[in-house]
Amino acid sequence: MEELPGTTSAAPARRRTVLSEADRRTPVWTGPRVWILVWRKIGAVENSAGAIDQPVWTRALIGWHIVFWVLLGTTLVLSFTGGLSQTRQIVFVGAVVVLGTAYQLIARPAIQSRRRVPSYAYRLVLIACLMVLIGLYPQSVFLMFIASAQIWLLCQDVREGAVLSLVLVTGVGTAQLWSAGWGWDAFWEILPWMLVSLVVSLLFGIWIEKVITQSQQRAELIEQLESARDELNEVHHSAGVMAERERMAREIHDTLAQGMTSIVMLSQAASVELDRGATADASARLKAIEDTARENLAEARALVAAFTPVALSGATLTEVLRRQAERFAAETGVDVQVSLDLPDEEVAALPQAQQVVLLRSAQEALANVRKHAGATQVRITLGLSDGGVWIEIRDDGSGFTPAAVSGGFGLNAMRGRVEESGGSVQVESSPGNGTRVQVLIPAGEDA
């Protein structure tokens, strides 16, 4: 058999059958713990279209490309100091060139695309080139440092990784046997490293596969949670929009719509009085129309700026209720009285939100009296009890049967507004006996 480079004729037999001390200290498997983990994770991420931040992993892959080229270049440089013959040196350089070209043209695209045929083709070329390099220059075994990681990086499952790891370890061991001279002593020297390398490769490959599987499951769970969170946010947004629309509808109904109703009724009355020639009365009606229109305009501007009624911005609730009563009496001829069961200063001290609810409730009750009751007298009472502050609107009109009436938008809007503040609405009525509406707002609530 051909004598190995760097040996002398005095000891050819020993060199053919036994590995050198340095070769025996060089393991076939050089620590896949970290490298398989990192490579396998990179592969999994590259295969998950946009699941992880791509620029970060792109930079990581660039680092691993650099590691490969540095190791391959180092092996090539060291081979020139290993005493190889010219023929072996040429073959060695050719194998390095083939491996580098295959990595650049096949492996790198395969890492991105995860296509099976290029992945298999590159790994077969990798194993073949390593066998040539290690057979010619045994110290090249440290290329296993990167080759083992690449085997697992390009795998689709554990079985594939196990088979290719077996082929890699067997091929490298065969190359070392060839380099050592095919002796049994060399075989028994190499066999433990082959077995250890294979077992370690399989154990870590299976472990990493489980880690990757769990990571993918967590990634899917996180994606589902994020999707559920987005849907919940959308639902909350839609609910908020609907609540705001409902609130705006109530404000418009309690202010602008009622004001417009007053204007229509006053206009009809003024027209009748003009036909009768009662110009003085018609003039008073027109003045009332102007005042109502101005108030509506102010309310419209207030709705744009905020929801606090204009009437409450410069007066107490008691004063506003009395003005509302006077205007209602002037427009309809109904006798409206306002009474307090608590001091006026306590009314003024009520939270602004409570005053708004009480005022809007009184306005809605008066609007129902105007449209449906046919009453001659209305009494508005504001009081304080153990349950909180309340307002009552009682009329002597035609009344109705509450159970037979589902309630129009006005009454429903009143209930919605009061219930939002934690209060309650009680309606008592019967045909021919008038109607009583009581609104109770819990004490201390500032809705």
Image (cartoon, rainbow, N blue to C red):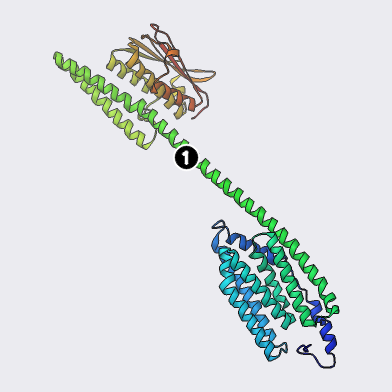
Who is closer to the viewer here, 114 or 20?
114
The residue under the point 82% across, 93% down is 9
The residue under the point 39% across, 7% down is 431
- Choose top left, top right, bottom left or bottom right for residue 127: bottom right
Q: Vertically, is 82 above or below 126?
A: below
Can residue 375 be seen here? The reply is: yes
Q: Secondary structure at mark 1?
A: helix
On the rendered structure, is 350 left or right of 101?
A: left
Farthest residue toward the bottom? 9
Farthest residue toward the top? 432
Amino acid type at image mark 1: His
The spot of residue 399 in percent (x, y) is 39, 10
- Count of marks overlaid on the render: 1
The spot of residue 190 in percent (x, y) is 81, 75
- Give the class, few, some or many, for how many residues have Cα within 10 Å of label 1's Cα (few <14, many ≥20): few
Can residue 60 be seen here? The reply is: no
Locate the N terminus and report the quarter of the image it occupies: bottom right
On the rendered structure, is 251 left or right of 184?
A: left
The residue under the point 18% across, 15% down is 273
- Choose top left, top right, bottom left or bottom right for residue 99: bottom right
The spot of residue 43 in percent (x, y) is 61, 63
Who is closer to the viewer here, 262 or 173?
173
The residue under the point 73% across, 81% down is 135
Quickly name the residue at label 1. 237
On the rendered structure, is 170 left or right of 365?
A: right
Farthest residue toward the left? 277
The spot of residue 64 in percent (x, y) is 62, 70
